[in-house]
Image (cartoon, grey):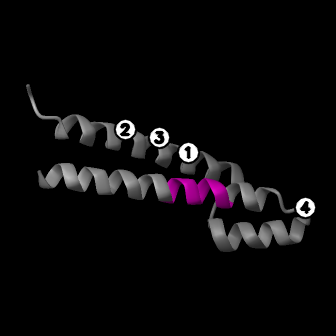
């Protein structure tokens, strides 16, 4: 039962962090000033571009959904 609980917790963490990373990527991508855009990209995203951050965030969300589904399947009681 501990693995089901850990799976659910991991699923929520992946969903929240993935949504945050994708959201930050979209927010920084909407900055019109090039100098501010580059400074925000270096500060909040690190290496890479906003497109890569959005892709990573969406992949984390997808992984969270998969882990959550697996935890739900594992928690089902057989009839």
Point out which mark residue 14 bears: none
Expressed as whole percent of the image width and height from the top left, the position of residue 30 reads 82, 57
Describe the element under mark 4 as helix, strand or loop. Answer: loop
In the rendered image, the residue lying farthest to the left is 79
Q: Name the residue carrying label 2.
A: 66
Position of the C terminus by quadrant: top left
Q: Which picture quadrant has residue 63?
A: top left
Q: Magenta stretch containing residue 70, yes or no?
A: no
Q: Are marks 4 and 1 in contact (CB under 8 Å)?
A: no
Location of mark 4 (residue): 32
Q: Using the numbered discs, state the Cα–Cα distance from disc 4 to disc 3 in whole angstroms.
A: 29 Å
Q: CA distance from mark 2 to mark 3?
A: 6 Å
Q: Is residue 31 above or below residue 19?
A: below
Q: Residue at x 72, y 66 (%)?
A: 41
* Numbered badge on residue 58: 1
Range shown magenta: 17-24
Q: CA distance from mark 2 to mark 4?
A: 36 Å
Query: Would you say the residues marked 2 and 3 are in contact, meaning their CB atoms lie under 8 Å apart?
Result: yes
Give the CA separation, mark 4 to mark 1: 23 Å
- Which sits in the foreground, 28 or 35? 28
Work out whether mark 4 precedes mark 3 in sequence or the reverse, and give the earlier one.
Answer: 4
């Amino acid at each position: 039962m501990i693995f089901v609980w850990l799976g659910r917790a991991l699923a929520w963490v992946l969903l929240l962090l993935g949504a945050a990373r994708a959201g930050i990527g979209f927010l920084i991508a909407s900055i019109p000033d090039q100098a501010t855009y580059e400074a925000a990209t270096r500060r909040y995203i690190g290496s890479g571009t906003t497109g890569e951050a959005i892709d990573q965030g969406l992949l984390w969300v997808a992984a969270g959904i998969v882990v959550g589904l697996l935890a739900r399947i594992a928690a089902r009681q057989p009839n």
